[in-house]
Image: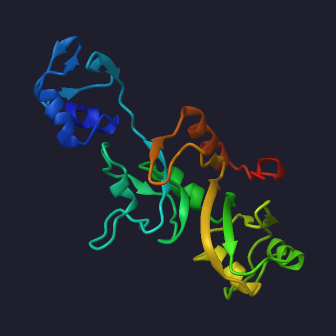
Amino acid sequence: MLRLDKLLADAGKGTRSQVKEYIRRGRVTVNDGVCKKPEQKVSEEDLVCLDGQAVGYVRFRYYMLHKPQGVITATDDSRDKTVLDLLTGINTAHISPVGRLDKDTEGLLLLTNDGELAHRLLSPKRHVDKCYLARTEKPLSEADLQALEAGVDIGDEKPTLPARACLNQDGALLLTIREGRYHQVKRMLQAVGNQVIYLKRLSFGSLKLPEDLEIGQFRALTKDEQERLQHDVAGYNAGEESLPF
């Protein structure tokens, strides 16, 4: 049993205060009867509707965000705007980013309240692919690409794992890594005598940034996307065919 307002908020129908207002206005029914008490206890067997549309209880929620530059990957900050601040109109309680993108990095970010999935996606043992587009201070040579693919010394105890590196038609680097070390892409480019001037994450495991998801926008993952993410961490390591280039 759980509160009616919590069920609606967890289902992504609005913030806790918003769904309370919906309930007070008589827009919510429980088993075909109008209910105006946000604290009303309901179970998974009860038929809850908002404006006549059935609302099911969703335990775990998954969102993809096209993170802009200038926003920090955190749940709360007293000075800067956070990625949670961009998830407007939904209940963000217990929602956290999976991993992090630097303040000056944009691109795909996964956010969820599924802590177990987040832990497995970030586990060093899983080697989940992450593809980035990087624009560099200087053009990259074939020798640079080969070095990035073989693994470079970024000042840690061991070199980076083998990666996939190539240039697109504009000369920008497409780099797929299977780790998540601190500032890894920037440090890998520094290791070959270069600097990153622009960085964008294009994919995270099987999840790819849609072309129609504008910077700063977010959406819930589809059922298929959720299932593929579960597949990413079920003892599966993506092969060549899964790389996005």
Is residue 125 among what the camera can see? no
Q: Name the foreground residue: 134 vs 163.
A: 134
On the image, the x and y values in percent for residue 147 come to 84, 78
Residue at 77% x, 48% y is 242
On the image, the x and y values in percent for residue 153 come to 74, 85
Residue at 39% x, 65% y is 74
On the image, the x and y values in percent for residue 234 come to 66, 47
Total label count?
Answer: 0
Q: Quarter of the image for the N terminus: give it.
A: top left
Q: What colour-coding does the image apply? A: rainbow
**Side (left or right) of 231 relative to 22:** right
Is residue 213 among what the camera can see? yes
Question: In the image as oriented, which residue stretches furthest toward the front?
Answer: 170
**Side (left or right) of 17 relative to 155:** left
Would you identify the image quadrant in which residue 37 lies?
A: top left
On the image, the x and y values in percent for residue 36 come to 11, 24
149 w.r.t. 240: above or below: below
Residue at 45% x, 46% y is 218
Q: Name the foreground residue: 191 vs 68.
A: 68
